[in-house]
Amino acid sequence: MSRAASGHRDLTALFDPRSVAVVGASDDTAKWGYMLAKQLLAHDDGRTVHLVNRKGGTVQGREARTSLREVSEPVDLVAICVPVAGLLDAVDDALAVGARAIVAITAGLSESSAEGRALEEEIVRRVREAGSALVGPNCLGVVDTTSSLQLASDTFHAGSVAVLSQSGNVALDIDSLLDARGLGVSRFVSLGNQSDVSLADLMLACADHEGTSAVAVYAEDVRDGRAFVAAAREL
């Protein structure tokens, strides 16, 4: 993963992608693939959106590919909403189409078992080797209201406060509190397992972001205390 001029990790593809794909897109309202695709299509702001469902056909009125590898152009950001058994193949497909950022909603990895941890570590190895970035797995999505990216189950009110949280409910509560005071959210990232992109990486990305004036953090664990303190000082 490249570094911005400041030396921070370059997460442009995560927050302001030119093209986005949802792997596991669905018409089933109970599935994450439905919620993410619905929000993304409602707030695409002109960016290219690809929907992938192994059965093909149409999803939410749009043509769906049976595989991400059927997409003939590079895809900046890929959201993966498939069962854990299909996650590694989905990541490989994302890297094959040039994804510079991946958001893995899929759960059942390091938080569940030793086998899950081993799979997660292998996925991170492949992502880093390809020069990409992975948010999650076991996360709830990403939002950037300044670039009109809504890749989460809920819509956030626009503003200048970034919310980095391991709890979706806490993030929604913060959004409500901000909105009641005439404020709003610039960015929301669900941290998940932080297997690749860390809380500190995201804090530094927000320090570089002109649309963010403050950062709210809810973290149940901090993987690298020194990096967290350094990022907090910079903020």
Image (cartoon, rainbow, N blue to C red):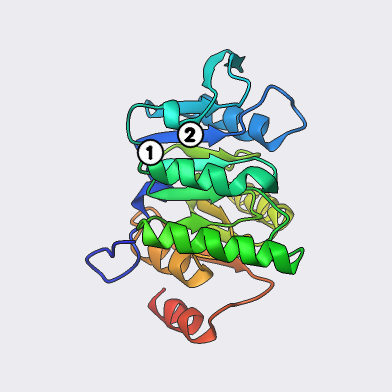
Residue 103 x, y percent position in the rendering: 53, 49
Say whether residue 215 is left or right of residue 75.
right
Q: Which mark is residue 21?
A: 2
| Amino acid type, callout 2 | Ala
Is any part of residue 106 visible from this angle? yes
Query: Could you tell me which quadrant the C terminus lies in?
Result: bottom left
What whole-number distance in Å separates the C-alpha atoms at marks 1 and 2? 10 Å
Residue 92 x, y percent position in the rendering: 48, 46
| Amino acid type, callout 1 | Val
Q: Tag 1: Cα neighbours inside 10 Å, few (<14), some, or many (≥20)? A: some
Is any part of residue 146 visible from this angle? no
Give the vertical position of 31 relative to 15 (above or below): above
Q: Residue at x 55, y 55 (%)?
A: 189
Depth check: 27 or 96 in front?
A: 96
Query: Could you tell me which quadrant the N terminus lies in?
Result: bottom left
Label 1 secondary element? loop
Q: Does the residue at mark 1 contact the one at mark 2 (Cβ under 8 Å)?
A: yes
Q: Which mark is residue 173?
A: none
Depth check: 31 or 209 in front?
A: 31
Give the vertical position of 43 relative to 88 (above or below): above
Q: Residue at x 64, y 49 (%)?
A: 140
Label 2 secondary element? strand
Say whether residue 130 is left or right of residue 138.
left
> Is label 1 or label 2 in front?
1
In this view, the residue farthest toward the left is 5
Q: Residue at x 49, y 29 (%)?
A: 43
Q: Which quarter of the picture shows residue 230?
A: bottom left
Q: Which quarter of the picture shows residue 72?
A: top left
Depth check: 100 or 35 in front?
A: 100
Q: Which residue is mark 1?
A: 97
Residue 68 x, y percent position in the rendering: 47, 32
